[in-house]
Image (cartoon, rainbow, N blue to C red):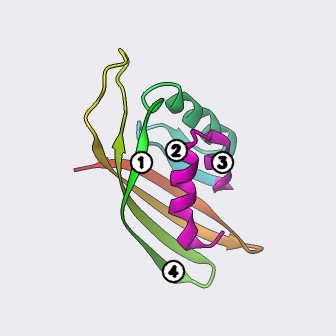
Amino acid sequence: MIPADFARSFAAAFAQQDATAIAALLAAEGMFLTLTGITAETREDVRHAMAQEFNGIFAQSRLVTGKGAVQSLGPDTALVTQRYVVTGAVDETGADLPRFAALLIAVLRNRNDAWQAISLTFNAVA
C-alpha cells in the first residue's frame, strides 16, 4: 500500500466492518482515536475498539467519501487527510442518528515498503 491508498483501504475495511483490517493499517506502536473517543494504543486494542463500534453505533454505518489529500512529510513519512460523511449510525436504543461529517487524519511511516499509521485520528467535524 502507498499513502494514496490508505483512506480507500480504511473505508473498505469500515464498509466490511473488518476490525482486524483496520488494526492492520496501524504500525505496532501506532495510536488510534476512534469516532466515539476510544483511544487504542496497540493493534489488539484497535481491533477490540472497532469490533465494539461495529457491534454498536456503527453496526449499519457506511462512509461516503469526500475530499482527501496526501502530503509528503519526507521520504518515509506522509500525512493523509480524508473527509467522509457517516450514514447509518444508531444510538443505544437502535434509533437512527442523523448523518454527520467526519475527518480521518493519519500520519504514515514507511518501513520496509510497508506504509502504516503511527497516528490515526477519526473525528466528527462540523
Q: Quadrant of residue 27?
A: bottom right
Nearer the camera: disc 4 or disc 2? 2
The residue depicted at 37 percent of the width and 18 percent of the height is 94
Which comes before the other along the chain, label 2 or label 1?
Answer: 2
Asked if labels 1 and 4 touch by Cβ distance under 8 angstroms, the answer is no
Q: Main secondary structure of the magenta part?
A: helix
Residue 36: x percent and y percent?
Answer: 41, 36
Which comes before the other along the chain, label 1 or label 3?
Answer: 3
| Numbered badge on residue 63 | 1
Above or below — where is 72 with respect to 44? below
Residue type indicated by callout 1:
Leu
Secondary structure under the numbered disc 2 in the rendered image: helix
Which range of residues does the magenta coloring cover? 1-29
Residue 98: x percent and y percent?
Answer: 25, 35
| Numbered badge on residue 83 | none
C-alpha gap between disc 4 and disc 2: 29 Å
Badge 4, how many Cα within 10 Å: few under 14, some, many 20+? few
Asked if labels 3 and 1 touch by Cβ distance under 8 angstroms, the answer is no
